[in-house]
Amino acid sequence: MRAPAIFLLCLAPLWAQRTLEYDRSVVSQVRIDARDLGYPPVDVIPSGESAIHALAVGPDGLVYGATGGRRSHLFLLNPLHGYVQPLGFLPGVSTMYRSLVVARNGEVYIGGGDAGGHLWKYTPHQDDAKPIRVNAPLEVTDLGVPVPGEAVYCLAVDREREFIYGVSYPNGQFFHYSMRAAKFAVDGKLAEHRIPGEKFEQEKNIGRELGLDLDGNVYASGENGALFRFILPTASLQKLDLTAPTALGREPYNRVDAWTRDADGLLYGGTSDGYLFRLNPKTLKLENLGKPLNQYRIRGLAFARNGKLYGVGGDSDEMARLFSYDPTRGAYEMLGMIDVNRRPYYAWQAYVIDALAAGADGTIYLGESERRSRLYLYYPE
């Protein structure tokens, strides 16, 4: 009976080792770490409820995340102490999309991804002093249903003008919410018809995120990959003479998965076909910056304090990979797969990343979207 045990012990060092070739294919280990969603083994958001679909950073630097699965949870990471604190679950909500924003006063707004999705407001109050609340309902204010019978697909916030913008699912209704007046308004549709193709094509082509320029205009993508712009003073939703970059003929299937903005006000977008582009809101000039990865879907984009743009790509059946883009040189850098190796203590590798955000201190936060998920922290140079 002892021989098999001795054999396994001899093999254990081999299992723990990694080749130099493998180390070159993952993110540098001095620049990445990971956090459980709570205090394991008990006070942690459980498997099947921990897939992170949205991340948002408040003006005070606090990082919030929303999960989906059997239940949808809200969690918090305060960079001062660096651990994840579950705040509670949203009663009756299981599906979550890119529908999490933080207002100027620190209040958190969450959109439900289930049919008849509500918009909720969570008001933080000495959260650091509260106990872990994995199995407690989140104390929220119900602000109502933006679009009756529809889920909330994505949200964006204009903190200066105190407006929240969103898109509904599955019919792509664009709406806005005035925080001052506490009122919703539906402004138009991004898509009228289903994506053409086989019978499995049941969705309409709706962008998964919204972009916001310095003047308060909002940008979205819709049917056939067309770009739209919402202008607040006239409450008008305009279809622009622009489409999200893709291979010729792929327009009906291509959408914008991620938006971000640089310090000069230029917008950057990442598409479901894996292209990065830059849009000048003043001139409406669109530049196709190519494909940073040989993969579909740019799932998240954010600028770090070093001036570089960071993004993550990969479809649900691919290994997620991190990249950077330097606008001053027009150069990409492939940073590798999302892997943390802290053996013998822990070793985690993310296959699917579905959310990305930049912290006030420059840390890039990556939300894993799997049955058992974690929050990854990347520290740029």
Image: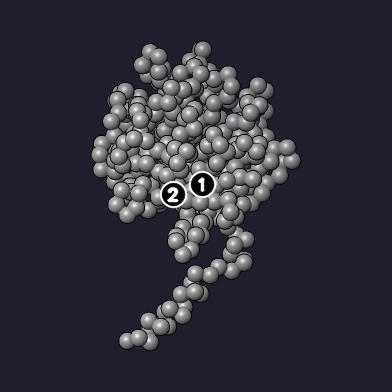
Rendered location of residue 345, percent (x, y): 44, 61
- Residue 268 falls left or right of residue 9: right
- Considering only vertical position in the picture, is 109 above or below 299? above
Q: Amino acid at mark 1?
A: Leu
> Is the Cβ of the residue at disc 2 closer than 8 Å to that at disc 1?
yes
Instruction: Rate crowding at label 1 as few (under 14), some (14 to 19) or many (20 or more) other CA atoms within 10 Å.
Output: many
- The mark total stands at 2
Element carrying mark 2? strand
Say which quarter of the image contains residue 166: top left
Residue visible at 40% across and 18% down in the picture? 179
Say which quarter of the image contains residue 327: top right
Query: Which residue is denoted by mark 2 in the rendering?
Result: 35
Q: Which residue is more in the foreground, 364 or 79?
A: 79
Residue visible at 52% across and 56% down in the picture? 339
Say which quarter of the image contains residue 242: top right
Query: Which residue is denoted by mark 1 in the rendering?
Result: 377
Q: Amino acid at mark 2?
A: Arg
